[in-house]
Image (tube, rainbow, N blue to C red):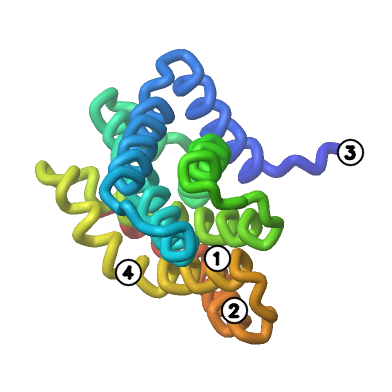
Amino acid sequence: MNVVTPFVRAMNAVIWKDLASEWRSREMVSAMLVFALLVIFIFNFALELNPQVRASLTSGILWVTLTFAGTLGLNRSMAVEKDRGCLDGLLLAPVDRTAIFFGKAIGNFFFMLVVAAIIVPIYSILYNVNLFNPGLIATIILGAWGYVAVGTLLASMAVQARTRDVLLPILLFPVAIPLLVAAVKTSSGFLDGSPITDFVSYLNILIVYDVVFTAVAFMVFDSVVEE
């Protein structure tokens, strides 16, 4: 019995299309990675602080790096579809358009995690901070998904504008502030070894943000791309 629905097949097709395209060109991940490494190196040489102060800034610097790199990837992901005429083809396909959203979002999520998996060890070496913490890794996964969920939705709106490179950050950053604050606070709590009761409210915000904006994107994506 075939349990794979048309929705899942369409979503998988979009994911594999993005992965295959990126594997051939290596444009988006390379740009995200170079940008993230530049941010880390700049912070490393600009903040000549003692080890204790550096440790206290770790979660903030890490999320600034991931946020900027993620924004670059989100913009590039939708811009490539638009410039090559693929976006119109996807929207004309006889499939549920939310499958397109989840396909794009999961692809962007994968690329963001790849960048995170590379910069976390490099950050640990440069700043002499141990970031191999299960709680931090879980926070990165939760934060990355929430960021790409809302970012993919807003990128699909901004891609139609001439000023899409500038418009996406303007739209995305204010909406993502609750997510980023919760991610920074939760990351700091895990890295400091604080009792989870001290930052469980921020962890809850992170989870609720993921659920709410995934649901919102599921409901409004069809209307957004229709416009």
- Upstream in the sequence, badge 4 or badge 2? 4
Mark-to-mark CA distance, 3 and 2: 39 Å
* Residue at 37% across, 43% down: 40
Looking at the rendering, in which quadrant would you find the C terminus? bottom left
Quick one: label 2, few (<14), some, or many (20+) residues within 10 Å? Answer: few
Q: Which mark is residue 175?
A: 4
Which mark lies nearer to you, 3 or 4? 4
Q: Circle 2 sits on which residue? A: 204
Which mark lies nearer to you, 2 or 1? 1
| Mark 3, secondary structure of its residue | loop
Mark-to-mark CA distance, 1 and 3: 44 Å
Quick one: label 3, few (<14), some, or many (20+) residues within 10 Å? Answer: few
Mark-to-mark CA distance, 3 and 4: 43 Å
Residue 108 % position (x, y): 47, 41
Mark-to-mark CA distance, 1 and 4: 20 Å
Residue kind at label 3, given as amino acid type:
Met
The quadrant in which residue 89 appears is top left
Residue 173 % position (x, y): 28, 63
Residue kind at label 2, given as amino acid type:
Asn
- Upstream in the sequence, badge 1 or badge 3? 3
